[in-house]
């Protein structure tokens, strides 16, 4: 399994002309059937997708429906153990708590790869490697 960060989900639903190459990549990732998420990613997706300042904002109903669809993927809840691990990972690697929580949720699901545009491409966080699937797009 590959853990997908919020930006993958947001690009998958983007209707912005400038993001269509990334949207295609994001949809290919989701269609591959090996994606995994966390409750944090679902929360971030809903908030960002419905943000009123977003040019292609989704309605509550659209975003909620997509969140329900995304529940078909393995989803890691953010547990107290993940919170504690994320505080340590963030401190150890000098990354934000939120990024560290992504890494630790991925680790909890057994994913060795996090697909993210936000974390450093190629970085290895003690066995969880980041890949930017949009680096060429």
Image (cartoon, grey):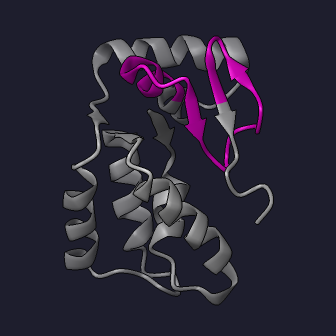
In terms of image quadrants, where is residue 80? top left
Residue at 27% from the left image edge and 66% from the top image edge: 66
Residue at 46% from the left image edge and 12% from the top image edge: 85
Q: Nearer the viewer, residue 13 or 59?
A: 13
In terms of image quadrants, where is residue 62? bottom left
Residue 137 located left or right of residue 73:
right
| Residue 133 among those drawn in magenta | no
Q: Nearer the viewer, residue 10 or 127?
A: 127
| Residue 121 among those drawn in magenta | yes
Residue at 23% from the left image edge and 60% from the top image edge: 69
What percent of the width, then of the height, locates residue 64?
A: 21, 67
Q: Is residue 90 above or below residue 5?
A: above
Residue 114 located left or right of residue 38:
right
What percent of the width, then of the height, locates residue 28?
A: 51, 61
Which residues fall within the magenta stretch? 103-129
What percent of the width, then of the height, locates residue 108?
A: 38, 18
Image quarter hosting the C terminus: bottom right
Q: Nearer the viewer, residue 88 or 14?
A: 14
Image quarter hosting the N terminus: top left
């Amino acid at each position: 399994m590959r853990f997908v960060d919020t930006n993958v989900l947001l690009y998958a639903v983007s209707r912005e002309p400038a993001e269509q190459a990334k949207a295609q990549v994001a949809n290919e990732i989701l269609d591959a059937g090996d994606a995994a998420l966390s409750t944090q990613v679902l929360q971030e997706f809903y908030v960002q997708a419905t943000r009123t300042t977003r040019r292609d904002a989704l309605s509550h109903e659209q975003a909620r429906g997509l969140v329900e669809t995304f529940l078909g993927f393995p989803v890691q809840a953010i547990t107290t153990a993940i919170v504690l691990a994320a505080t340590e990972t963030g401190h150890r690697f000098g990354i934000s708590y939120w990024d560290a929580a992504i890494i630790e949720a991925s680790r909890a699901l057994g994913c060795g790869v996090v697909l993210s545009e936000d974390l450093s491409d190629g970085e290895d966080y003690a066995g969880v490697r980041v890949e930017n699937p949009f680096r060429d797009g």
